[in-house]
Amino acid sequence: MSKHDNTAAVKIENLSFHYGDRYVLDRINFEIPNGAFIGLVGPNGSGKSTLIKCILGLLKPQSGRVSFFGIPLGRFKNWEEVGYVSQKANSFNTAFPATVYEVVSMGLFGKVGLFRFLTKKHKQKIMGAIETVGMTEFTHRNIGELSGGQQQRVFIARALVSDPRLLILDEPTVGVDAASVSNFYQMLKSLNEEKGLTLLLVTHDVGVMSDYVTHVACLNNQLHFHGDTKEFKEISKEGFSQMYGHHVHVLEHLH
Ligand SMILES: Nc1ncnc2c1ncn2[C@@H]1O[C@H](COP(=O)(O)OP(=O)(O)OP(=O)(O)O)[C@@H](O)[C@H]1O
């Protein structure tokens, strides 16, 4: 199949998952079109991280199917096409004495073994990824000397260095100050629009996120809504709170 067909980047069919007798995901059907920037929202404990882990094959659902670019998960081999930045990226040991350049080069380990064997082409890729996230001036700074938002940009660069087609981010803005969150989302939006990168962003920032994404999915054990940003913004606050399972304050933005 060609790289540029209309197959969904991710297709989830009738997926259910339970821990013991506790159902966390109930018959989820959900598609991420190629080129979309999807915000996945839902209250604490609604199953967002569990869904991501099922998509990445880290957890095996009791029923249902996941496919990447038309290939069932069990047969999917091109993992360099899928970048993942976990919530835990924030708790990376930032006292570890590594520069931005070294952290980003770790994204190529799968391909080159150790970074001392990097070729000129690899070095260009690393510098390109650092430039893409706007961190060039910090290339040789120690990761521990950067702010939370800057560190998250570096982790995105590490995920981008292998040229993924799909990037999955699990709450990347936890611990990032409000002003930097908007800049961070703007950077993701540019990656989506200019580089055609498909993005799945798990977040709690319902209001802020909806100014940047192309689609929204609302999860609360079941998928309660999945549509484009325009449809999402048309849902009344009451409707949204109901679907969320409790009252939610959707932050209004001052433009
Ligand atoms: N390993 C586990 N064993 C048993 N239950 C678990 C396990 N991991 C998560 N859970 C439970 O499954 C439910 C869904 O958890 P999950 O982490 O997927 O939610 P979430 O939407 O990502 O939450 P948050 O927004 O708080 O990160 C929660 O009730 C959680 O307590």
Image (cartoon, rainbow, N blue to C red):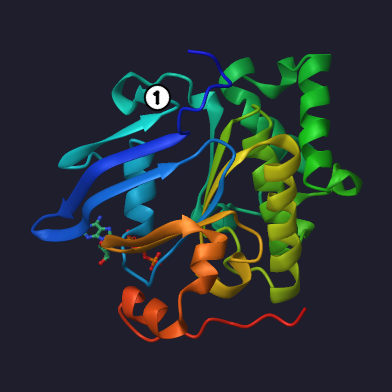
Residue pictured at 58% horizontal, 21% vertical = 4
**On the image, numbered disc 1 is attached to which residue?**
70
Q: Is residue 201 visible?
A: yes
Q: Viewer-proximal residue, 196 or 170?
A: 196
Residue 34 at x, y = what percent? 54, 35
Residue pictured at 91% horizontal, 47% vertical = 137
Q: Is residue 71 above or below residue 58?
A: above
Q: State left or right for residue 247 relative to residue 146.
A: left
Which residue reaches farthest right? 137
Q: Disc 1 beta carbon < 8 A from ligand 1? A: no
Quarter where residue 221 is shown? bottom left
Q: Is residue 20 above or below residue 118?
A: below
Q: What amino acid is at disc 1?
A: Gly
Which residue reaches farthest left? 21
- Number of other residues with Cα within 10 Å of mark 1, as a class: few under 14, some 14 to 19, many 20 or more: some
Q: Is residue 36 above or below residue 177?
A: above
Residue pictured at 41% horizontal, 77% vertical = 240
Q: Viewer-proximal residue, 157 or 27?
A: 27
Q: State left or right for residue 25 relative to residue 98.
A: left
